[in-house]
Amino acid sequence: MNRHAFKSLPALSLATVFLAGCSRKDVSGIGFEEGLSSVNDQSLSLWQGAWIAAGVVGVFTLILIMWPVFFHRKKDENFPKQTQYNIPVELAYTIIPLIIVAVLFYFTVQRESEIVKVTPEAQAAHVIEVIGFQWSWQFIYKDAGDYKSAKVTGTPAQPPTLYLPLGERVRFNLNANDVVHGFWIPAFMIQMQNLPGVENHLEFSADKIGTYPGRCNILCGRNHSQMLFSVKVVTPAEYESYIQALVAEEKAAKA
Ligand SMILES: [Cu+2]
């Protein structure tokens, strides 16, 4: 193999590392919209950077494969010169992947530690309990004023809607009462498991008015595919009146 090729190795791996830090405005969302939730603000650039890094590594690998295919074809019956125990090459292909993985790891840990921060329940502005069960969801709005809670329970035939106040952080307590389910709102780049017997916590704000699909992303049984729900992001005032309507409905049902 010719020596010039190896001189470009460190340059390419450095390009990968720097491109991974590109501003998220420079590239498309590759399937995700910017600014939909506080999690998108953290995850989107990580997602884009990982794709760019993967793209650069992919193209470089393809070149490394195609190069011998086209330029080092069998020319005669002589056994070609062998290059095993080439220390610079071995160092390069050990160190460069290590650097790439370390950079991806660093940014992942940094963003993840931001994403998983939650406010203690007593201080949280809004608390919603999300219970996964075979095969739908129950949402309990714990900020339902003087009334204990406002519950919405879905069925596979009638998937429930989760209301969220625009721009306000909501703490979610995730539970399951039978098997493991996965609370997933793809557009918001969030997913967390609902585990029986263990409460998981998540907190984020939804930052754009609209309706978004949600689903269970852990295979949880026969009707797993019907564990759908909608997320409706409304103004804080509309959210408040929705909760009050739920409370009134519950009170009327109990009376
Ligand atoms: Cu499920």
Image: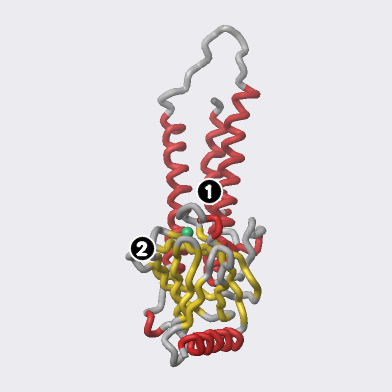
Residue 156 % position (x, y): 55, 63
Disc 1 residue type (three-letter): Leu
Q: Is residue 241 above or below residue 33?
A: below
Q: Earlier in the sequence, mark 2 or mark 1?
A: 1
Residue closest to the far top: 77
Q: What label sits on residue 14 in the rendered view?
A: 1
Is residue 163 visible in this depiction of the protein?
Answer: yes
Task: Tell me what residue is drawn at x 56 percent, y 78 percent.
Answer: 164
CA gap between label 2 and label 1 equals 45 Å
In the picture of the structure, the residue carrying the numbered disc 2 is: 196
Disc 2 residue type (three-letter): Pro
Q: Quadrant of residue 161?
A: bottom right
Residue 251 % position (x, y): 48, 89
Q: Is residue 201 above or below residue 75?
A: below
Give the structural element (helix, strand or loop) at label 2. loop
Q: Is residue 6 above or below residue 35?
A: above
Task: Tell me what residue is drawn at x 59 percent, y 25 percent.
Answer: 68
